[in-house]
Image (cartoon, grey):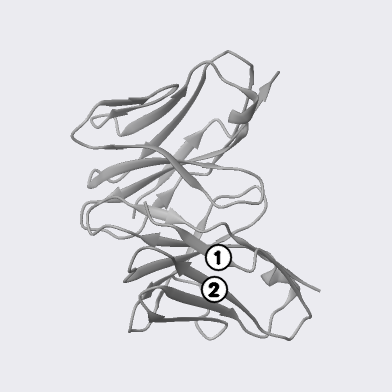
Amino acid sequence: GAVVSQHPSRVICKSGTSVKIECRSLDFQATTMFWYRQFPKQSLMLMATSNEGSKATYEQGVEKDKFLINHASLTLSTLTVTSAHPEDSSFYICSVKTYTGADGYTFGSGTRLTVV
Amino acid sequence: GENVEQHPSTLSVQEGDSAVIKCTYSDSASNYFPWYKQELGKGPQLIIDIRSNVGEKKDQRIAVTLNKTAKHFSLHITETQPEDSAVYFCATLKAAGNKLTFGGGTRVLVKP
C-alpha cells in the first residue's frame, strides 16, 4: 500500500485563527484523497473528497468555507480550518485511495487539533 | 444510503481467548469489506479485507467471514494477545463507489 504522511500530529491554536493540516502521499500519485473527522470514542466521519486539480466535494453539513481543501498536486492535499472555534477541536485524518479498483485505502496518522 | 451497524461496541476478553466482531450492512451493492485497527492517537490501519465473491479469508490469527445473503460480515481474532487491544472498525464500499462507510467501532480490551 501507499505511505501517507500527515502533519502536524498535534496542533493547538487560539480561537479565531486558522490552522493548516497537510496530507502527503509519499510513494503514490493520489488523484483522490479523503478527509475525515473523528470525535472521541466515535467513528470516522467523512468530511470531503479531495480531487487533484479540481474542487473538493463536501459531505452534507460540512461547511466548505470553514474547512478549505486544496489538492494542487498528486502528492499533497491540505485541509485548512478557518476561524477555528473550540467545537472544531477533533482528530482529523486523511486517506489516500491507491487503486482504481474497489480497494486500497491508506490512512494518515491523524492530527489532533485543540482550539483554546 | 448505506448503513453499517457494528456490534459489540466494547469487548473484553482474556488473553488467549477468541474475539468476534460482527457488522451488518444495508446496501446489497456493497462489494468490498475491509476491517481496520486503530490504536490510540493514530490513524486506522487495514488488517484484513474481503470481497463479495469470497466467503472467508484468513491471515494468521485473523479471519473475516462474509454472508452476502444476510448482509453481514464478521472479524475473528484467535489466540488474542494484549497488543490486539485497540478499536476495530468495519467498513463497506460499493462497486461503483468511492467512499467507505464505517461501522461505529468496537473497543477491544485483551486482559493479560
Which residue is nearer to you in this view: B44 or B2? B44
Residue B55 percent coordinates (x, y): 24, 26
The C terminus of chain B, quarter of image: top right
Residue at x-position 57% and y-position 80%? A80
Marks 2 and 1 in Cβ contact (< 8 Å): yes
Q: Is residue A84 left or right of residue A43?
A: right
The N terminus of chain B, quarter of image: bottom left
**Quarter of the image where one finds residue B34:** top left
Residue at x-position 77% and y-position 81%? A15
Residue A66 percent coordinates (x, y): 57, 83
Disc 2 crowd, CA 10 A, few/some/many (<14, 14-19, 20+): some
Residue B84 percent coordinates (x, y): 58, 29
**Residue A22: mark in rendering:** 2
**Quarter of the image where one finds residue A13:** bottom right
**Quarter of the image where one finds residue B99:** bottom left
The secondary structure type at the circle numbered 1 is strand
User: In terms of sequence position, does the residue under pointer 2 or pointer 1 come before the other?
Assistant: 1
Q: Is residue B14 left or right of residue A96?
A: right
- Position of residue B29 relative to residue B48, above or below, is below
Type of residue at label 2? Glu
Disc 1 crowd, CA 10 A, few/some/many (<14, 14-19, 20+): many
- From the image, tell me which residue sits under label 1: A6
- Position of residue A95 relative to residue A16, above or below, is above
